[in-house]
Amino acid sequence: MLDLATPLVAIVGLLETGGPVMVLIAFNGAAIGAIFVDRLLVIGFGRGRRERAVLESAQLVRALPPRLARHVWELRGSQLAVELNRPLSMLRSLVALSPLLGLLGTVSGMIEVFDVLAREGTGESRALAAGISRAIVPTTTGMCLFVPGLIAHLYVRAAIGRELERLTHLARTA
């Protein structure tokens, strides 16, 4: 049987070890994942609706003069591109924020280390180790979130490009 408690205990332990900044990093990771899944669902499940819209536009454009028809197609293509690309800037910003949040965790952890040094001196090695751990864990987590976030952004951007190319081809052949 699959034990779900073990990964949850590990995650809670990681959040506690890394300090309060880890909560921000966790929310950032959840937002990256949510936007990634949203775009995949929009691309996949909205395909039929976009195809119907392109085919309806093709029927309307046939009655227009060629110059006006070209402008209508450009407008429709721009509308589709905006619809698909809108959340990508937010995704890109959240991915770029990941290492910065990790750096914030590093700074807060190092402040804790210096605080221990000021209060207790260099003899309290356990307190120093806890502060150093609190400094390193958020940095590592932020960097580990950055890499898959960047891959997710690039994948979604490429999928949107393929979808727009497919719709453009459909418009030309309709």
Image: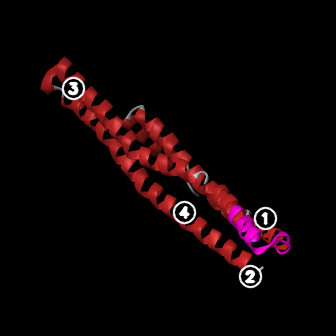
Assess whether mark 4 and mark 1 are in contact (beta carbons under 8 angstroms): no
Q: Residue furthest bottom?
A: 173
Work out how far the residue at label 1 is from the one at label 2, CA to CA, in angstroms: 18 Å
Amino acid bearing label 4: Arg
Magenta segment boundaries in residue numbering? 60-75
Residue to which mark 2 is pinned: 173
Q: Which mark is first along the chain, 2 or 1?
A: 1
Q: Is residue 5 magenta?
A: no
Q: Which mark is first along the chain, 3 or 4?
A: 3
Residue 99's place in the image compared with 171, above or below, is above
The scheme the figure's colours follow is: secondary structure
- Judge from the rendering whether residue 59 lies leftward or rightward of residue 141; answer left or right: right
- Viewer-side label of 4, 3: 4
Amino acid bearing label 3: Phe
Residue to which mark 4 is pinned: 157
The image position of residue 27, as x and y in percent, is 52, 40
Residue 161's place in the image compared with 26, above or below, is below
Residue to which mark 3 is pinned: 114
Q: Which mark is first along the chain, 4 or 1?
A: 1
At 59% from the left and 51% from the top, the residue drawn is 87
The image position of residue 132, as x and y in percent, is 25, 36
Residue 123's place in the image compared with 12, above or below, is above
**Main SS category, magenta section:** helix
At 39% from the left and 39% from the top, the residue drawn is 101
